[in-house]
Image (cartoon, helix red, strand yellow):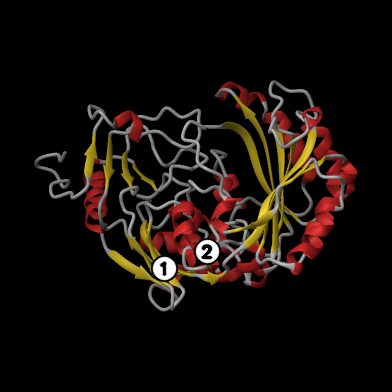
Amino acid sequence: MTLTGTQLDGIKGRVITPESPEYDEARQLFGGGFDRHPALIVRVANDDDVARAIAYARASRLPLAVRSGGHSGAGHSVWDGALVIDLRDMRALDIDPQARTAWAEAGLTAVEVTKAVGEHGLVLGYGDTGSVGIGGITLGGGVGYLARKFGLTIDSLIAADLVLADGRRVRVDEKHEPDLFWAIRGGGGNFGVATRFQYRLQPLPQIVGGFLFLPATADNVKRFMDACAAAPEELTVIANVMPAPPMPMIPAEAHGKPSIFAIVAYAGTGDAADRALAPLRAVATPLADLLHPMPYAEIYPPDDPSYRPIAANRTLFVDAFDRESAESVMKFIGEPTSTDFKVAQLRVLGGAVARVPNEATAYGHRQRKLMINIAALVKNNDEVAAHADWIKRFEAALQRGPEGAYVGFLVDEGGARVRVAYPGPTWDRLCEVKRRYDPDNVFRLNQNVGAAS
């Protein structure tokens, strides 16, 4: 469908209106709790479509939203009354196994790219969810299972194609539009629509990874995090302290009891992997040990389209995790609230992430020791608000060092929280790049760096 007599004439993709039969499906997001009704959804087919959609939105004074995978925690991917540029049909992937590079269009998901490059014995680190769109995870930084070994997703980014607010198409890299290239590596969707990414790939035919479940006590949590911090950088672990799920491999008597649900990835196999994993296994007798050699893509579980979580949550960086931190985790996870499913997600950073200077990219937390996400999974938005005090107290109990936030995990928390995602001179430089490339703040449905800041 096209809209006759408008800048949308000539669109190669699809224009979906509220009257279109696919409208309700097209406006769904990954997260629950959103019921947004955009004015138009443009399923773009190429960069020309993107430029036409931007021009139409500007001429019609419509807010402009951009969707890659629809995982925005604030729901920015779809907005009431907006024109949504939906990139899901831009799915070209060109892998050069000899050069160990790939060009990937922004409609692809992390698991799709991961499986495809894995067929050549190569890897690229995205985040921790396979269904996330590569656009959002790349522009936000990309903290995933290979971060300590190979760095963030942006550390593998060679170049990107963008369509700017004025319709210009630009290719950015270290030599071409270097300030813009700096800004898109962590600065989110503030500067244009990223349609294509070129990545550097790493050889890694197999990892040892999967799930490791341990009983959670304050002692066990502290020992486990100490072991993660002391591990070689080939080992990246996401430790979720939470009630043990009713999975068949976990003893029934442990269901619902505090557990450490660790998602583990060791970049390699053999004796070195066994040595690195031994301290984790030694913390306590595992409730279930599912670690095994696998292709890296297997770290992503099968997608469940019906899973649309609603959560009260907070993201923070800390510089230490001490005994008091572990006790606080156990206290707040066990605190009675309207939901029994509460989790503290603990990630030791460092390694390749920390070897890149803070000023090299717009991701400005290179030296922070851990990222922590705390969440309560709830049934509706009213329960999100009801957990605000729990979130505030939990965060205060864990904070060690200056306040900081990972932009990729922010929800709708206001400008002050966006500001702490970009510490020190990072914020000032981002604002300058914003003024140069999007002075009218056309791209504002994001964790916004305002042009007037």
Identity, as a three-letter code, of the amino acid under mark 2: Leu
Relative vertical location of residue 395 with respect to residue 387 in this rendering, above or below:
below
Residue at (47, 68) in percent of width and height: 120
Above or below — where is 401 with respect to 204? above
Quick one: label 2, few (<14), some, or many (20+) residues within 10 Å? Answer: many
Front one among 216 and 444: 216
| Between 80 and 294, the one nearer to me in the picture | 294
Dot 1 corresponds to which residue?
A: 102
Q: Quadrant of residue 19?
A: top left
- Is residue 161 visible in the rendered image? The answer is yes
Q: Is residue 401 left or right of residue 152?
A: right
Of the residues under marks 1 and 2, which one precedes in the sequence? 1
Q: Residue furthest left?
A: 5
**Mark 1: secondary structure:** strand
Q: Looking at the image, which residue is at 50% across and 30% down?
A: 32
Residue to which mark 2 is pinned: 124
